[in-house]
Amino acid sequence: MAATSTAPSAGAFRATRRRRAARSLVVTVSLVVTVSLAVAVVALFVLTMMVGSFRLGADEVVASVLHLRDDPSVDFVVRGLRLPTAASALAVGLALGAAGTIFQQLLRNPLASPDFVGINSGAGLAAITGIVLLQAGGLVVSGLALAGAAVAALLMYVLAWRDGVAGYRFILIGIGTTLFFDGLTGYMLTRAQLSDARQAMHWLTGSVGQAGDGELRLLLGAVLLLLPTAVLLQRQLRALELGDDTARALGIRTELGRAGLLATAVALTALAVAVAGPIVFVALVAGPIANRLLGPAIGGIVPAALAGAALLLTADLVAVHLLPTPLPTGVVTGAVGAPYLLWLLATTNRQGAGG
């Protein structure tokens, strides 16, 4: 009798140990990948400020950024010329990477991205309208882009609401809204003067080097505030991935949690677009890349944000320094992201997950 009662308890003990070992492995993998991505991002951030017509060493860049050394010529190149672009690429990449993975997990679809659900298009339409009709520039264009993204997100949420927001309905309405906004943007371009049209097309392509100090400070402040907010909401995000019924059983207020996560992702996207224009595909690919690296620890917002920053810093290096003619950053991200999108569509369709 004693042997019989001891056997189940021994089996339960072994099962508990296995679960703890698996949980410990997931935490270790997540930590290692996150730290490795952070190191890569810091290295790319410094490298961005080292290369150019006036080459600098890593020690000179770090000393100038941290105000450890007083060298007027180096400080002018680093702080005055290169640091704003590098900081813009870092902040925009972090924002887009985090926003993209929130959309994908929340809507449970790898194609869910601000690029395809109307956020970028709404920002683009508002910005182009300001450039063409108001001859606006700088902070005004950024403010219009921010407002356009917020209005587009609110419109889609209202249109997608049917006793809640379902992923596929939100995505389909977002695609329709994107096409509508893109059509209006094309019409506005046909009404523009040549100089305004050139400025508008440059903005629509997306480039991390076009932000002013005011827009950049706003984005950096928002990333410092919203990224920790997204991490705090990650428990709700993981619960919502399991379905509304399961999330309610876990004590999650589903619609409030979903609205908070969407608002965080939209704010990050809108501010990134306001600073750099609608740079495509970074939000789409950052999350999947981070998940490939994470393995069993998939779904981390911070690793996805770091992957987005690494992608954008690399794309800017390629666009400015490795091509025969410097190009906007969005050209490189589009050239890399389009084949990935085709591959994603093909594999999703084969797996039967794409509807």
Image (cartoon, rainbow, N blue to C red):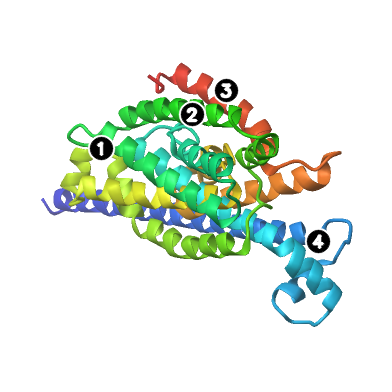
Q: Position of residue 24 (x, y in %)?
A: 42, 57
Asked if disc 1 and disc 2 are in contact, CB closer than 8 Å, the reply is no
Identify residue type, mark 3. Answer: Leu
Relative to 339, is 145 on the left or the right?
A: left
| Pointer 3 or 2: first along the chain | 2
From where the camera sits, is residue 229 visible? yes
How far apart are labels 4 and 2 at the CA level?
A: 41 Å
Task: Tell me if mark 1 has few (under 14), some (14-19) or many (20+) residues whose alpha carbon lies within 10 angstroms of its own.
Answer: few
The single residue placed furthest to the left in the displayed view is 1
Q: Which residue is mark 3?
A: 342
Q: Residue at x 72, y 80 (%)?
A: 67
Q: Which mark is residue 184?
A: 2
Q: Which percent across, then down, holds residue 266? A: 41, 47
Per the image, the residue denoted by label 1 is: 243
Left or right of residue 35, residue 232 in this image: left
* Rendered-image quadrant of the C terminus: top left
Sequence-first tag of 1 and 3: 1
**Does label 3 or label 4 sit earlier along the sequence?**
4
Q: CA distance from mark 3 to mark 4?
A: 35 Å
Badge 4 amino acid: Met
Q: Marks 1 and 3: which is nearer the front? A: 3
Q: Secondary structure at mark 3?
A: helix
Which mark is drawn over residue 306? Answer: none
Report crowding for label 2: few under 14, some 14 to 19, many 20 or more residues within 10 A (C-alpha): some
Q: Nearer the viewer, mark 4 or mark 2?
A: 2
The x, y position of residue 23, in whole percent, is 39, 53
SS of the residue under disc 4: helix
- Count residues near mark 4 (Cα–Cα under 10 Å), then give few for <14, some for 14-19, many for 20+: many
Q: Amino acid at mark 2?
A: Leu
